[in-house]
Each structure stands twice: as C-alpha cells, then as structure tokens.
Amino acid sequence: MHAASMDALIFASLPSSSCFLHPLLSPKSPNPKPYSPRLSYQPPLHTRSKSHLSRKILNKLHVSTSDHPSTTVPVEDPLSSGDTFEKFDWHSHWYPLAPLCDLDKRAPRAMRVLGLDLVLWWDRTEVQWRVFDDRCPHRLAPLSEGRIDRWGRLQCVYHGWCFNGAGSCELIPQAAEDGPQVHTSSKACAASYPCTVQNKIVWFWPSTKPLHKNILMNCKPPCISELDDPSYASLMGIRDISYGYEILIENLMDPAHVRYSHHKIMRVSKQRSSLARDREGGVPIVITLEESDINGFLAKQEFGYGKFVAPCLFHMFPPSGSNNGSASSSDSKAVADQRRFLIVVYCIPVSPGRSRLIWSFPRNFSVWIDQIVPRWMFHVGQNLILDSDMHLLHVEERYIAEIGPSNWEKACFVPTKSDVMVTAFRRWFRKYSNSQVDWANKSLGSLLPTPPREQLMDRYWTHVVQCSSCSVALKLLKVLETSLPMVTLILIGVVAASNQNMISAAVRTALVSIAVICFAASKWLSHFIYKTFYFHDYNHAFV
C-alpha cells in the first residue's frame, strides 16, 4: 500500500474532529521478513471445474509499462491462452448483510442483496439469526413490516400469519381450529436462506434450494482473523451507496484518487518535489498484480498487499510473517510487536445502480481510543469521505452505462501503474461474469435518472437508520437542540419577571449572556445535526 494512501486511510478510521490523534498517522513498525500471501479462499466443490482444481494458480498477470507515454499499462489477458474459464456463479457465495452491533433483535429488518428482497430477524427460540424472503406466502405482503410475537415467531401484520425459524407456518388465524390444517401445507411456508455469523457480521447464502441447507459445512464466508482478535480495535460501519457494486469496488481499489477527491478531508503526507506540480502533491503509485483467478486476485504495493476475494471482500494489509508459515520464535515476537493497520471493506451488490458498503479498519495500536470516543464520531469523517466523491461516481456510472460496461477498456485511458487493481477488477468482471452482476430478480431495469443532490447523498436513510450508534446520537442531540431554546426562554422570563431589587445587575447580565449562548448553541447544533446526519454537500471547486 502506498504510504500516502495508508496515512489517509488510517485517518479515515479515526474521528474527524480529533486533532490529538495526529501521531497515529505515521505508525512505525519493525521490518519483518517479506512474504507472499496467496489467494486462499475456495468456493464450494460443486462450483469448481476439474481444470480449476488441478491448477494451483489459474493465471498470473504481468504488469509492465511502455516507454511511450500514451500507451495503456499492458496486462496479459489469460483468455488469449485458449484456456477454458468458468463462469462466476454469483449465487454460490456468501454475502454479508449487516454488522451485529447495528442489528436490533426486537424487530425484523428489511435488506436487499443481489436483487433479492430479504427480511433479517432474530429467532430467540433457536437463539440465532434468520433470513427469509421478504414476502408472506399468503398475499406477498412484506414480512419486514411485521413483528416478532411473544412466542418468538415472525408475524406478518397483514393477516397475522406466524412463522418459526425454519420458515414453517405455525398459525393462520383465519383457519378454523377444527378444520383442515392448512398451515402445514408447503405452500404456507416462508422461503428461508442459510445464514451464519462470522467476523461479527451476519452472512447469508442466496439460495433456498434444499441442497444448500447445510452449505456451511462445506463452505464458509471469507474470514479476517483480526476482526475477532481482542487485541485489535475494529469498529464497523455500514452505508448504502447511490452507485453500483462495480463502481464502488474499483473506487476502493484506487489509492490515487485520495489526494484529489478527498482533499482537506483525509490528511496525507506530501513531498516537497510533488507540491511543485500541483497543490495536492500527487505522486506515482506502483502496483503490481501477482495472482488472479476466478476467486479474485492479489496485488502488491510498496508497503503491503491488496486482495480481492470475490464477490464482496477487498482488504489491504501490511506484510507480516514468513513465506512458509513456520516462523521462528524471534520472528513471531517481531510480528506480535508490529503496529498493524488493515483496511477491510465488503462491497455488496444491492440492485442496478445501488450497492452497500460495510467497512472496518482493524489496528493493534492506540486501541484505547475506541473505548473513550463514541462510535458515531468515527462515522462523521467516514461519511464525509463517502459523500465527497458520491456525485462524480454516480455520474461516471451513467457514462459507463452509455458506452456499455464491456467497452470500459476501450473508453477509459489508464496508462499508469496506480490503475492496475482497477484494470484487474474490470478484466476479472469481464472474463468471469460478462461485465454484469447476475441479479436474482431478472426484471430489474436499467439505471434510474440522477436524483437531486440532497437525495443522492442522503445520510439518514442510507446510514443513520441502519447504524445503532448514529441513530442514538441523533435522538440525544435532537433532545438537546429542543432543550436549549427552552432554557433561553426560561432565563429571559426570569430576568423579565424579576425587579432590580431581587437580583443584582451582575447576575442579570450573566443570565442574559447564558440565554444568548444557549440560543446561539441551539442554532449551531441544528446546523451540525443536519450536516452530520442528513446531508452534507461537497463542492470540489472551493476546497
């Protein structure tokens, strides 16, 4: 990972208002022995061909640059070798739904992933999360609008049908008790998806077929051990994004845009020589692709690695350990003492033109900060970062749709090594999925027209209602905002009702001053609440 982008993303994981955290922006660490991590995640056996199983590495992409400045960085295309490549099966992989910390066990929650409308709810009878199709088999009303009744069943509030954790209907109130047991019919069942919890996130498998009922025994979601390591701080966040999955994931693979799209939001180190060329101090970023196959790819940067595990996970991490995994005791101690910072993001396809991001930045230093700084304060800066390039990426997606995603390489000029991961993803997307997500709902249409900026960069519905910390903070700040004008009126009333003999001039002046301060504070707080929890525009021309 380039040093500038690493510094920037460390800052992104910290509260934007915490200037006292500046020493964390350049963590120093010992230099452990270099190693080459490999693509380790494997899909279930039924999704892999014999040729895939027999090859240790499906292909390697060799990156080189041409002396001619107008030549795109060439990357060898494995399709040209004549090998047969599998088609990526979007419905044979685990997808993250939401962090556990943002889920409420008391109420069902509507989610959309891969074009599927889902309801996520807590089955207290079996003590586990459940994922159903968000439609009642009776009249297709959304189950997410229902409730969990006193017996722990998911109840549809349209006609009161109740379902247990397996999806079986346990009650149809309109059916006579002494009549046919219609609730036992298979047609009365709610469609249930396999789900599990890993890395403090609820995951689901997008198939209700019986053969996938026990899929967890054969295939598990990709695991990041640092997310479960108590020695790491790993706060999470979730946000719905107003552009598609492929735009989101390639943007996160692009460290070169940080200095420009997020200028004055993310602090990055600048070299004196680079400042002579532009204000932001852009520098060359060398990225090389080491491995690629249907499961994703691995890229090396100057200070670490970036790994894409298809279809959702992209994470960046520093080198550590030894090449063969059998480190000596001295090496193990060096790794344990190393200050490590990782970037873990899950890019979830929701529907055409919509995606969802779950992020975490695990670190094993200054863990105490997360214990004293409220989680919502971390999200203030992170949401601002997402908003600062939201509009331009939304428009970019429309341009790509006009030319056709399969023509991306012809339309986009990517001559530098900083675009290697972006190019690798676009080629992976083309080779294994024909440059399109295999939506479960085939009737999903094309991209919708661009909405007003207030709707495009809305924070309340895309983040706050999904985030337990931000929703609580908003309620408390609104109470404070309402209380301050009341305090102002009370103080002014006390001063007006009292005569000069009752209180001294100094006390009178103090009360009036406090009243003015409370009034001004309420106005500032109103503005802060709107920008933090509802809408914050970002004009690149004036930063």
Image: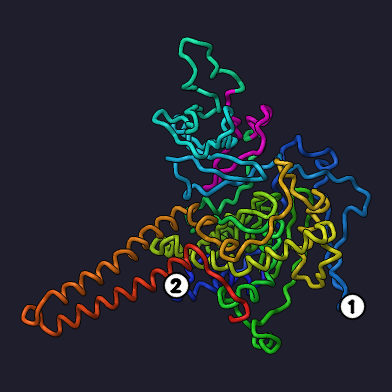
- Which color scheme did the rendering employ for the protein? rainbow
Assign a secondary structure to mark 1. Answer: loop
> Cα distance, mark 1 to mark 2?
45 Å
Return the disc, 1 or 2, that comes first in the chain's sequence: 2
Looking at the image, which residue is at 68% across and 63% down?
A: 394
The residue to which callout 2 is attached is 18
Assign a secondary structure to mark 2. Answer: loop
Q: Position of residue 93 (x, y in %)?
A: 68, 42
The quarter holding residue 55 reads top right
Q: Which mark is residue 68?
A: 1
Query: Magenta segment range?
Result: 188-215
Q: Nearer the viewer, residue 166 or 65?
A: 166
- The correct choice, above or below, for 139 with respect to 525 in the image is above
Q: Position of residue 212 (x, y in %)?
A: 67, 31
Q: Amino acid at mark 2?
A: Ser
Q: Quadrant of the C terminus?
A: bottom right
Q: Amino acid at mark 1?
A: His
**Residue density around tag 1, few if under 14, some if 14–19, many if 20 or more, within 10 Å:** few
269 in magenta = no
Looking at the image, which residue is at 64% across and 54% down?
A: 355
The quarter holding residue 336 reads bottom right
Q: Position of residue 104 (x, y in %)?
A: 45, 44
Q: Is residue 13 visible?
A: yes
211 in magenta = yes
The quarter holding residue 338 reads bottom right
Q: Nearer the viewer, residue 302 or 284?
A: 284
Looking at the image, which residue is at 58% across and 63% down?
A: 457
